[in-house]
Image (spheres, rainbow, N blue to C red):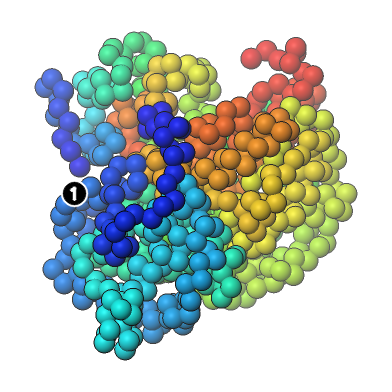
Amino acid sequence: MSETLKQEELVQIDYKPPGTGWMDTKPDIRKGKINWGAVQKSVEYLDLPNPRKWSPTDDDWQLPKDWKKIILEGMRERIEKFRTFQVFMDICVRCGACADKCHFFIGSGDPKNMPVLRAELLRAVYRKEFTLAGKLMGKMAGARDLTEDVLKEWFFYFFQCTECRRCSVFCPYGIDTAEITMMGRELLSLVGLEIDWITTPAANCFRTGNHLGIQPHGFQDSVDFAVDDLEDIIGIKVEAPVNKKGAEILFVVPSADYFGDPHYFGFLGYLALFHEIGLDYTFSSYASEGGNFGLFHSNQMMKRLNSKIYMEAKRLGVKWVLGGECGHMWRVINQYMDTMNGPADFLEVPKSPITGTVFENARSTKMVHITEFTADLIKNGKLKLDKSRNDQWRITFHDSCNPARAMGILEEPRYIINSVANNFFEMPENCIKEQTFCCGGGAGLGTEENMEMRLRGGLPRANAVKYVHDKHGVNVLTCMCAIDKAVLPTLIDYWVSGVQIGSVHELVGNALVIKGEKERTLDMRSDPLPGKEETEDV
Amino acid sequence: MAIFEWEEVKIDVDEDGFMEEPDQWNERVALALASTEGVAELSEEHWHLVNYLRDYYQKFGIAPMIRKLCKETGFPLKKVYELFPSGPAKGACKVAGLAKPTGCV
């Protein structure tokens, strides 16, 4: 679909608000700006309300008769249950600090993509139903009736937020706008307004342990394939244990790492690294997904999907858990896991068996991020690295929203990249680290049918990549999130040509000098290493 | 969400034209689906790829990873795109009657 959208048209962004008031302006619901509704089978599988065949482009969304009552009752329940929800509804002074911080607003000019106004869609109904001023004074007090049109507007805009939380960085009150979107989506789900890109992966995750629906024998098949592939590159057949009881560490990765390109090259990097340091670890064919699309659906779904990591850690009898290059998984782990499914007292405080470093920050969750682990190995001089094996790359790094903003993993990936490669260039200050711009396709929005919004929302990120590409000849954008790796190739190809997408651990795999390896001629992509082009026989 | 008809073939497809019921796949269905992908005829190479995908799907219930597909069919990714212009997932898998992959892919 990206082929049919013209760049020169997409960059004609009109920031002037429409002539009509916001309450009277209807959304432009059409392919390109929406995600398909969830398929009936997946909704039924998860035992969610109102399974049916429907499409957001239909006029009739086949809502249950008492939909309004269900939504308002759902709001009441959540206001009572979640203190944050009520505070975030009440506290906003509409100062507008967040207004121009959203990538979707920057790329579309649609005022309802200003985080303040997106949240106002929910707040206006909250005022009408739950505040005295709103009940008495209605529209004058910023209150609004909940109608079917309003509900459609919720669906449209709460699925035009990637829960990236860039706006929250700038909010003087620290309102977590992602949590407002999460509440909006929870309420929509109560009447069967779900999107397939979230609900089907969640259903798959229950059935087989991962979003893609890969069964245990399929998981084993993929791991075996990767082991063979790596052997072709390094000349050593590494061990990659699956469901090994009594291993010291459970390693959990996003399923795309062993399914998709370019994720997979980083997966080979993990295998090479663990072999070299002799790590006693295991994969689990059930906790075969780091990602948790429950975060994009509802708190209950997030909790249900998250629990299997601890369940598997217990079943396999490991000491602690290591997590791979996943994005939103880390928001779930760092901010919700311990209270939802913890405390995991049966696990030990994570301690690197190689360096002896105790990961104090993971004392409570018992789960360590792979870049913390690898950075610690490098810092302690445990790895022999040949930077020149990454000389084919001129590298920049995209901070994935959740590891950066929800976890504060800012320096570790940079430290690793600078230790394994020679040519690293930062994008401009105001769009990296905690101010990083979203890939435009997170939180379940990375679909084909949503392509126009993805390209618009990804424009600020792509623009910064273009800057370093033009200025420094950057030819690879590294990142550490599976959604990034899935959606950035299309985005970057569209706005900037000549930049690949890569993993941090792909670069680690390239540079790592492994005891007993054959003369390395290929990188993790099975492309010739710099200076080895002649000897390559592909 | 829709019914797709081509010659005598009549199948349920989703919004993106993927089969709703992959078990109803047969070679005529493959030809019908190929017509939506701008592939008028299925050559021996097309069938080599489609049959590999069907076989993998029968064993594992999903599509293989792209890397594996390339290695085991002997077709580099570029070749896959030549055969099916929308690529392995959206083109080849669709014609082989597989479901659309969802998640971080």
**Image quarter of the N terminus of chain B:** top left
Q: Position of residue A492 (x, y in %)?
A: 55, 35
SS label for mark 1: loop
Q: Residue at x 46, y 32 (%)?
A: A7
User: Is any atom of residue A69 visible in this view?
Assistant: yes
- Amino acid type, mark 1: Asp
The crowding category of the residue bearing disc 1, from other C-alpha atoms within 10 Å (few below 14, some 14 to 19, many at least 20), is few
Q: Residue at x 65, y 59 (%)?
A: A434
The one of A131 and A192 positioned closer to us in this rendering = A131
Please determine whether, in this image, residue A64 is positioned above or below residue A255: below
Q: Chain of mark 1?
A: A
Whole-percent x, y for residue B4 in the image: 17, 31
Q: Position of residue A533 (x, y in %)?
A: 73, 16
Where residue B5 appears, as percent x and y from the top left, is 14, 27
Q: Is residue A279 visible?
A: no
Which residue position is annotated with label 1? A58
**Rendered view: A85 above or below A98:** below
